[in-house]
Image: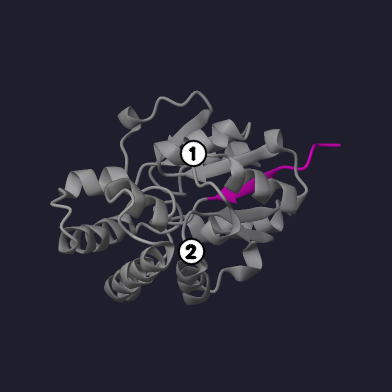
Amino acid sequence: MDKQKAFLFDLNGTMIDDMAFHIRAWHTILNSLGAEISMERTKAECYGKNDELLERVFPGRFSIDEKNLMSYDKEKQYQQAYRSMLHLIGGLPAFLDKAKTARIPMAIGSAAIMFNIDFVLDGLDLRDYFGTIVSADDVKDSKPDPETYIKCADLLGVAYADCIVFEDSPKGVEAAANAGMQAVVITTMHTREEFSNPNILFFIDDYSDPQLDRLF
């Protein structure tokens, strides 16, 4: 018998093309706090948990409670700006249906807080596709640490080597590599030239790419 495989998805930038809205929200907030940070630098800092981002930009300045409040403020700004445009990346609805029909277990492993994951899953009625969800609230260390994807695989009961991760960022692909998993990269936020990870199976622009047929 074929070994059980699983598809593990990052969320922002991978299932929905929304990273520009996250970057703009962070850019506004960070500069309001005196960071004097460029949009390009903000983009480079947009990985991992919100509190980790704030600590990188303002080391030691804010308490955990203060960072949590700023995190929710940022997510409210993002959701207000993006809500009317909330939709899955092209081809993904059919891809999810095909995977569900093939009985391939699927999970979401995201550095987002559940407040944002719920915004997407409930807004697009996606919960039935995913056997488990691992958020920033569920891990100690965020990507590129492998904990997020390891926890997804463990909860699904699938071997790490049999998991295929869908990611849009080099840090996320690195997290997959650190978990012993291969990755498919969607180029919504980063160009192919920004990736040097040897665990990449292939790149796609969206989920209508015929290369994805190789996964079934």
- The amino acid marked with disc number 2 is Ile
Callout 2 environment at 10 Å: few (<14), some (14 to 19), or many (20+)?
Answer: some
Distance in Å between CA atoms under marks 2 and 1: 17 Å
- On the image, which quarter does residue 19 sit in? bottom left
Mark 2 in CB contact with mark 1 (< 8 angstroms)? no
Query: Residue furthest toward the right?
Result: 1
The residue that label 2 is drawn on is: 113
Q: Position of residue 184 (x, y in %)?
A: 50, 38
Q: Nearer the viewer, residue 187 or 12?
A: 12
Q: Position of residue 179 (x, y in %)?
A: 62, 35
Label 2 sits on a secondary structure element that is loop
Label 1 sits on a secondary structure element that is loop
127 in the magenta segment: no
Left or right, 76 with reference to 182: left
What numbered label is drawn on residue 47?
none
Start and end of the magenta stretch? 1-9
Q: Nearer the viewer, residue 203 or 111?
A: 111
